[in-house]
Image (spheres, rainbow, N blue to C red):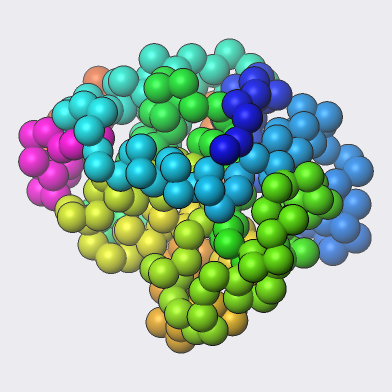
Amino acid sequence: MATEVKGPLNGIEEWDDEVKERYRPGKSQEEFRNYDDTVHPRVREFYRQNHTNQTYDFVMQKRAEYLPKQRMEMGIWEAMEYLNTLVDDSDPDTDLSQIEHNLQAAEAIRADGHPRWMQLTGLIHDLGKVMCLWGEPQWAVVGDTFPVGCAWSDKIVFHQFFENNPDAQRPEFQTETGVYEQGCGLENVHLSWGHDEYLYHVVKDYMPEEGLWMIRYHSFYPGHREGAYKHLMTDRDQQMFEWVRKFNPYDLYSKGHTKPSATELRPYYEELISEYFPAKIRW
C-alpha cells in the first residue's frame, strides 16, 4: 500500500500549466529532451511521488474504494460548485475559479462549432478532481497516467523515478505485457489512478463513447501523444485516440484571462446537462 505524503505542488492547476508548457505548439525535440532538467523543483517532486506510489496494488485499492460510487449523490452543476470550493491561489497566469476554467474549455469547444456532447465533455472533464476534497494527495488525482502491472514505457515523463516504485521488484510486472495479453485492448488495462479514470466511471452510463474516451484518456500522454503501449491496444483503440487528440488542445490551451460569466452561461449549460444526465448521479 502506498504511503500518503503531502503533494509538492501549490495547487493541482499547477500540473495543468506544466503539461501545457511541456506540449506547447512548436516546442522542439531538443527542448523536450531537456525537459526533465528545466522544470520547477515542485513539479519534479510531484512526479517523484507519483511514480513511487502509483503501484498496481494502490490502483486496485482505489478502484475498490471509489468505483462502488458510495460517496454522495449530486448533480453535475452541483459538482462543479462543489469543486469550486477547491481554491487555488497559486496560478500566476490566471485568477479564474474552477467553474470558470471548465466554462472556458466548454466555450472554446462551442465557439468552434463542435457537437453539444463535446461541449459538455469540456465542461465536466475535470470534475474527478473532487477527490482532492476527500483527502486524496495530489499524486493520486492529477499527473500523466500510465498502465500499471506491466513494464513502464520510457516515454513516461521522469521515467527514472520508477526505480523506487515497489513494483520494480515484482518480476511479473516488468515484462512488456505484464499481467495483460498482447492486443487485449485498453478497456482491460489498469491505468494509474486519477481524476480521469474516476470520472469515467461516474459518467459512463450517460455520455457518448467519444466523450468518454476524452474523459478517460486525456491525461494518458504516453499513449495518445508519445505512441507508447500500442502492443496492448486494438486497432479501434488507436482510432479512438483521434478524439482524445482533438479534445486535447481545448484542455491545454483554452485558458485565458477573459472570465466567462457563470451566471450568464448557467442556463445554457444546465439545459445541456439535462439532455444527458438525471438531476442527481452517484459519486
Query: Residue shown at 12%/33% (left/top)?
Result: 280
The quadrant of the image that shows the N terminus is top right
Q: Is residue 251 visible?
A: no
Residue at image point 57% right, 30% down: 138
The vertical placement of 210 against 252, above or below, is below
Left or right, residue 175 beside residue 101: right
Q: Is residue 226 above or below residue 59?
A: below
From the top left corner, tell me how far across and down residue 261 is, in percent: 33, 23
Q: Which of the image's four quarters has the C terminus?
A: top left
Drawn side of residue 182 relative to residue 66, left or right = right
Q: State which region is magenta.
A: 272-283
Left or right position of 67 against 41: left
Q: Residue at x 17, y 53 (%)?
A: 206
Asked if residue 260 is positioned above or below residue 128 in the image, the reply reads above
Q: Residue 243, percent across and down?
A: 42, 67
The one of 31 and 278 positioned closer to us in this rendering: 278
